[in-house]
Image: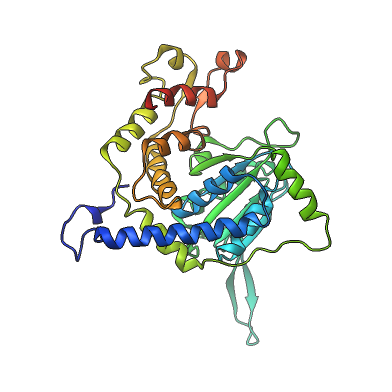
Amino acid sequence: MTDTRTAKPNPSNGPEPPERLVSEVEALGQRMAAVRKHIGRVIFGQHDVIDQTLITLLTGGHALLVGYPGLGKTLLVDTLGTVLGLEDRRVQFTPDLMPPDILGSEVLEESDSGQRSFRFIKGPIFGQLLIADEINRASPRTQSALLQAMQEYKVSVAGKDHDLPKPFHVLATQNPLELEGTYPLPEAQLDRFLLQIDVSYPDEEAEKKLLFATTGTADAKPEQVLTAEDLIAAQRLVRSVPVGDAVVDAILKLVRSGRPDEAGDPNIRKHLAWGPGPRASQALMLATRARALLQGRFAPSIDDVVTLAPPVLRHRMALTFSARADGITVDTIIARLCAPLG
């Protein structure tokens, strides 16, 4: 994902002047602080989850939020739609959900003159922010219906392509696989998600605030801070952020060392069934840029790489049966891979 705009020094066709880029980064940092503030009125605690979700949107990607029911995953996505000014749609995934229920379908209509023609009726996927609620409760056939949309930003129905609106993001929620009535997502679809964001239980202080806020007479309502056009501009800015050679080398070293045939540590190699592909490197490159912008910094650091390694890699790696039997987790392997980076 090399940005060709950074390859030419010509001001008319090259990178923006550093002064302008710095001012835009500072302005975006202030606006994202306001976004965080308004989200915090509804979502208590979960700061890492909020930041990782915002990073996903700033990169133009999709996120998979994994956690037990009742942790506010759907509420977070719904709040983001309001605060960011996006047209959001929600689909509750169930075992009997079919692909046309998501994509849309063609219906046969007859005019007053008796002439018949087909008309395409758009499904809920034609929104800027799609909430795919409990995606792992739908059948694999329905899950796969999202693949083309997430990768190509269009859908094909009856042999015709239909472009999706811009921006377009899928924020899917998923319950852990040990719960009854769930279906594992195929690896090809998992790889389409920029980040897998694990949503844990809130800490005691956040849960205390939650009790008072949700059991009183008035509920806090989020307010719009950005527009869709603002988000698109921020996504362009993310791709303009320079990345130092040290950060690029750290990304490559981390991702490549997570592959069984390239892992330098034999203790890691024997536990891996398969590892992350080039899309993981691309995701880390974009995500580190977005995290820097989110914090008002001009360029990403190796600390960004280490922090974002778990959500980028955990759904792009698989352990051997013996590793799982020994109680080793993917996050344990990722921590070992990150250790040499400091």
Q: Residue at x 51, y 44 (%)?
A: 193
Establish if 234 lies above or below 188: below
Q: Residue at x 38, y 57 (%)?
A: 25
Q: Residue at x 32, y 47 (%)?
A: 1
Q: Residue at x 75, y 49 (%)?
A: 210
| Percent position of residue 104, x then y | 61, 62
- Tell me: 10 left or right of 301: left
Q: Is residue 201 visible?
A: yes
Q: Is residue 157 visible?
A: no
| Percent position of residue 295, x then y | 45, 50
- Work out which quarter of the rendered image holds the C terminus and state it: top left
The mark total stands at: 0
- Residue 85 picture quarter: bottom right
- Tell me: 335 left or right of 9: right
Question: Which sits in the foreground, 143 or 85?
Answer: 85
- Tell me: 93 left or right of 197: right
- Residue 11 picture quarter: bottom left
Question: Which sits in the foreground, 271 or 202?
Answer: 202
- Residue 23 picture quarter: bottom left
Question: Which sits in the foreground, 320 or 39?
Answer: 39
| Percent position of residue 106, x then y | 60, 66
Question: Which sits in the foreground, 59 or 27?
Answer: 27
